[in-house]
Amino acid sequence: MKAPPPGAADKFKSSAPRVFPAERPGTLRASRPHLGLGIAAAVISVGVATAAVYALKELAPVVSLSVVYLPAVLLVSAYWGLPLGLATSLLSAAAFNFFHLPPVGRFTIADSRNWVALAAFTIVAVAVSTIAEVARSRAAEADRRRAEADLAAALARELLGGTETPRALAAAARRVAESLGLSSASIELGICQGEQRRLALPLSGADGIQVATLLVPSDLPAEAEQRLGAHIVPALGALVAIAVRRDALQAEAVETAALRRSDDVKTALLRTVSHDLRTPVTAIVAAGHALGSDSLTPAERSELSDAVVEEGEQLAALVDKLLDLSRLQAGRAEPREDWVSLEDVVLAARDSLPDSSGEVRLAVDPDVPPVRADAGQLERAFANLLENALRYSGGLPVSVLIRRSGSRAVVRVVDQGPGIGPAERQRIFEPFYRGWAGTNSRGEPWTGSGLGLSIAKGFVEANGGTISVESLPGQGSSFVVTLPIEQPAQADPGPEPAATLPT
């Protein structure tokens, strides 16, 4: 197994430091201090007690002064365990016997009652060592539980903090490996099989269904494997299950929003078909029936014929817009790029509008180069922008300004209409959205389909451009189209002709 790169663990720790309560001096730790320090403490404390007995002989009988050695036995037994505690009790008994009990200077006990001191030291050592071991084991267990709680909190932050699930799973696996001191760990969604070098631990949710697999090295220490199975895997499985369920709910929410949007579009389309298509069809049918009458004058017959043509053109334009919108929404409006003059495109868009639409004034800077785009799509886009601008200008001229700005060409379509409020500016490029209706140059109300601006936006963006609107209520509107400028490839001039010497 490959070890993590140097510094990876330090970097990981610094990103989410674990905070433990500071240990107070004199408290028991989960691990014993160094054995050498314990031996030194035993020898020094027994020596200090032996010297203290000499000073206390004037105040109390020697036999009763054996209690002076008890602090040494208590200290060593509590911090270094039973073996060193028993050794300290024997050393204390030997020192007390050799230096203070008659006959002094010999390891013999004349009075059998002095065996009580040695027995007391031994009992104290055993009792204190046992109590200290219990306290130490509980402290170690508390440290493990605290570390597991910190790990669970860190895993919850990683998996439920809004990060993408694959990245969150990788971060959670790193935290598990760091917590247990493993060389590697990974979390895979679904059921994975273990192998010779990797142990597969199933991660299941509260319902018992496996949602992922934790893969760890197979040569786990027994303690680490026990911690994984008893505490870490159940918590990790629950968190991964919640994260997977959250992703599923988010996907369902997105799908629901898309379906709702699709229903809105279908509803708007049906409304448009039922009104905008029926109106010209009704007019054409009525005019067709009237043309069959023998009582019509030539002037009335010509007027009805013109009405049929006009309504038919409106019907064809609406059908074209619906087809354009369908191609854009289906992603099938791939541009056929070629070098295009924006001036020619705008003029063609203006000429495609009915003569009664209104006046369009064009101003072009001389330094605007051709752009690489689909001329037909841009013409449809600008035709819709011009139609929209003329609709709201109330018979006043519409200005089109074409200039160069750095590496982009900017086309600005400016009308003199009532302007667009902030709330409407957020929605005017949505399909089937209709703002204020306005009137045309003849004072007749416009009843647009709500498709023009959406189609213009789609065709402009399909050609790598952007479209935006600048407007204030009562001060007209300006639609700004920007398109990228590419430098045309220069033709290879070929080899220079060889120079000829004059004869």
Image (cartoon, rainbow, N blue to C red):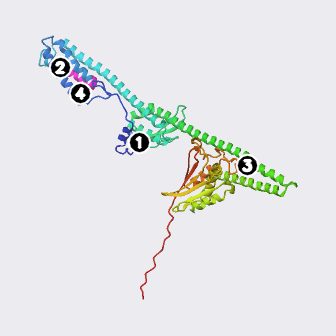
Distance between the alpha carbons at the discs numbered 1 and 4: 37 Å
Tell whether label 3 touches label 2 (CB within 8 Å).
no
Distance between the alpha carbons at the discs numbered 2 and 3: 111 Å
Distance between the alpha carbons at the discs numbered 2 and 4: 16 Å
Distance between the alpha carbons at the discs numbered 1 and 3: 66 Å
Amino acid on which disc 4 is placed: Gly
Q: Earlier in the sequence, mark 2 or mark 3?
A: 2
Secondary element under disc 2, as helix, strand or loop, is helix
Find disc 4 in the rendering and name its residue. 38
Tell whether label 4 touches label 2 (CB within 8 Å).
no
Secondary element under disc 4, as helix, strand or loop, is helix
- Residue 388: image x %, image y %? 63, 50
- The magenta region covers 78-98
Image-based side of 264 in relation to 183, left or right = right
Pair 2/3: label in front: 3
Distance between the alpha carbons at the discs numbered 3 and 4: 98 Å
Mark sitting on residue 184: 1
How many other residues sit within 10 Å of disc 4, few (<14), some (14-19) or many (≥20)?
A: many
